[in-house]
Each structure stands twice: as C-alpha cells, then as structure tokens.
Amino acid sequence: MHNLLPLIWRNITERYRLLGVHCQICGKDYFPQRRICPVCRRKGKFVPKQMPHEGKIVSFSLVHSAPSGFELEAPYFLALIELSNGVRLLSQLVDSPAQKVAIGVPVKMVFRKIFEDGPEGAIAYGYKFKVVSGEGKKPAGKKNPRKMAAVNS
Amino acid sequence: MKTGIVGYGTAFPRMRIKVEEIARVWGKEGSRIAAGLGIREKAVAALDEDSATFAVESARIALESSRIDPSKIGAVFVGSESKPYAVKPTASIVADAVAASPVTTAADFEFACKAGTTAIQTCMGMVGAGMIEYGLAIGSDTAQGKPSDALEYSAGSGGASYIIGKESESIAIIEDTFSYTTDTPDFWRRQHAEFPEHAGRFTAEPAYFKHVVNATKGLLEKTGSKAADFDYAVFHQPNGKFPPRAAKILGVPEERIKQGLITPFIGNTYSASAMIGLASVLDVAAEGQKILVTSYGSGAGSDSFSITVTGNISKPGRRQAQSVFAQIEAERAYVDYATYAKHRRKIKSL
C-alpha cells in the first residue's frame, strides 16, 4: 500500500464520468480539467462540462512491457482517442479483439477498475474504452505480428 | 401510491468459459455435467471487472432507457455478495459514476442471490411513500466457486439495474410484492473465507423450492391471481434445471419461463440472476402483459413480484438499446481454464 488515496480521490469526477471543463469565453472544451484556459488566460471562465462517451481511435500502441500494477493485463492496447467533441485523451482499450483495433474505428467509454493500491489499499476505478465496430482504416505500414497476441483486457 | 420500473439495464462480461472446459481440468464428464445443470457456459469477469463495474455499466444503460435526470435519484442500493470492499459501499461508487451524488442516500445490501430484488422493494417503499422521486436498485455479482466444486460450473458474473419511480412514468407497474424468509443455512461464506460453502442437495427442497414456491403462492393469494394469469414468469436460476421444476410445481407452462431463463448462457449471476431474467422479458414484452418474478437468496428467502407492462414500453428508447439475448450473442470470447483462473485470481501467487 502506497497511500495513493489523494491521487485516486481527486480524479473521481474525471475518471468516473469524463467530467471536463468548458470555457465560456472561447467556447473550447478541455479534458482533463484545467484551472486556466490556455487561449483566454486569466480572462477565461470555466464551467464543468460532461464530455461525450463516444469517440474514435486516432492512434494506438500495443503495450507488452507494462508498468507496475498492470503486468497481468499485458499485452494491452493504449489508444489516443478523439471524443466526438474533438477533445483527445489517452486510454486503455478493453474487450477489443486485435483484428478490430484500427485507426478511425468508433469506440465508447466503459467503466473499469484501473489499479489497486495493493491488496489492502483503495481501488481506483475509471474510464477505459472499447471498440464498438470492426469498421475503419488500417494504419499504413507493416503489420505487427505480435499484435495478434492480445486476447483480452 | 403504486410504483414501477422507469428504466432498466444489464451488463455482463465478454469472456465465457464452457462447462466442458472446466470439467476437462477436473477429470469429469463435461457433457453430463452441462446436461445435469442445464448450463452450457458461464460469463467470466476480467481482471479489471468486478461487481462495482457491472453495477455502473448496467446503471448507465438503465438511465438511458429511463430518460431521467440522474440528480433526481434519491436512493442508490446495490445488492451483492461479492463486494470489491468488505467495508466501503459499492453504492457510493455507483452514485458518483452516474452523477446521482451528492444529494442521495446509498447503501449496499447482502442477501445471497436476492439482495437486488430486496433493493427494488426498498425503492418501491421510498418512492411510494413520497420520500424520493426515483430509486436505483442494482443486483451485481462476480460469483465465486471453489476450484473443482460443483459451484464452479455455474458461478457467473453480471449486473442488472432498475430505476424505480412513479406509476405514470413506468414501462412496467409493480402491482404487488410478497416475501418469504426463514433461517435456512444452505449456502454461506464466513468472514475472511475466500469461497462460499454450500449444503449440497439441501439447497434444493428445503431451501430453493420451499422459498420460491411459498413466496410465489403468497403473492398469488395476496393479489387474487393464478399462475396461469401471467404471460411470463422468471424464477431465480442457480442452474438451468431448478426454474422449470419450480414452474411445474406452481403450474406455470414451461414456455412462459423461456424468455427469462438466462443461466444456461451466462451462468448464475447471483444477485443479478432473476433481475437479468426480468430484463430479458422486458426486452420483448408488450403492453398489458403480466410478469411474475420470484427471486431466491440462500440463507434463505424469496421476493415475489407481480408486474404489468404499460404502453410506455413501446415508446422509442424505453427498452435497453441491446437486448439481453443480443448481448449474449454479440460479444463472446471463449477462454480456457488457465486464462479463467488468471482473471478470477484463482492462481494463488497472483
């Protein structure tokens, strides 16, 4: 147990609900939440805003050497996702067979366990994404034969 | 004031293991066990899934079909016997994840496989008394079975959520409910024990059948109806064999339980079992049709419900977007016993 509670608790609204912010001055949406609008600076005025739960894959990578706490889930996909309002975020992909993971395919948010602070510590829950359709454009370049090794989660 | 189901949703994992595959590892005859239990395969939760994730996923679907503002949910109750935390509510995780918090009450319920239907009764009481506008009642479990035990063939994973509200907004009115409870220790898990114990054949006649039959008979007597009056019947389904037997005892034609009999395809999802069965019936039921639901929780008790479908069910978007059977068929990934053991953390060094 590493007392990760502040890290877990402070991000609950973002991780559970994809709650971002909207600048009422320039009209831009941000996720994760920001304190200052990078466009309007101190003139910006933020209000909380629910981000859409749907998007598409912009880019992805298959992680074989997972960081501590994620070893049992490897190999797994990490994807850069563009939500339907244009906001981009990085997320793990789950329930998505390797043959369906491609640039441009639609994805939707799911609620999953992210990590545990050891067997006796707090559990961090939050968003991951899953492919909702097999359609999309395959990325150019060589096929990665190791990609087929990813079976689940 | 009468109350009813305003929205519903179900969620269960993509991974499946066949009964034959489990039997192969333990040197048993898989086809005989599958036929004996009436279970083909069961749903397996992944490493990052638990009763909280199925509760949230199903609750989000229920909210979509209810078309209500989540901040109007005044109570969130989660029934489960496989809570992620021994002490710390799952209900508060769900309340925050669906934006029902902070102005809501929340608690976890435990009564083996019937805690979810008891959560429905509690919401009915609170809505009916005018204490809250809507209540969210959930049954969700990642059921445990000791390796090689008979339970291992049936213990599945999944969740079902119901939003209970006023009669006028409901897709199905809950006409009445009746419960039957006795101290019958047929199945339990002691403090700190990893897997539940059960009393073998004792779980049948003095446990499941006594409570399911008496609760259902009590409901029929209370409402002045007959089993044959119902278009559909859903009974708790620890396996695929008990519900047809209960139906026969009660005089319910077997074809009326078929739509709500889900265990053969995803296993026994414990607190979610009868609730997923009811969801499958709501996926297809038409206005005016009557549904009989009787849950069963070891320890032991049954909650029986008389439900009538309203015209609201045919309005666009009021059923869950993907039916229970569509979810069963759509997404499946069969795993072997080793992968199942990894994801369910049955390998002790994990």
Image: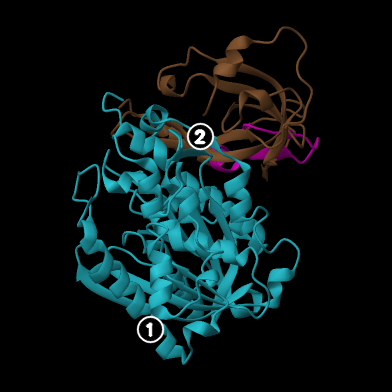
Chain colours: A brown, B cyan
- Identify the mark at residue B217; answer none if there is no mark: 1
Residue ID at (59%, 52%): B60
Residue ID at (68%, 54%): B321
For the residues labelled 1 and 2, say whether their Cβ atoms are less than 8 Å apart.
Answer: no
The image quadrant of residue A78 is top right
Three-letter amino acid code at disc 2? Tyr
The image quadrant of residue A111 is top right
Q: Where is residue A114 in the image (x, y as percent from the top left)?
A: 47, 32
Residue A31 seen from this side: yes
In magenta, the rendered stretch is A13-34
Residue A118, placed above or below residue B134: above
Nearer to the camera, B93 or A111: A111
Query: In screen coordinates, is B64 left or right of B246?
Result: right
Residue B327, placed above or below residue B343: below
Q: Considering the image in quadrants, where does the C terminus of chain B appear?
A: top left
- Identify the mark at residue B334; answer none if there is no mark: 2
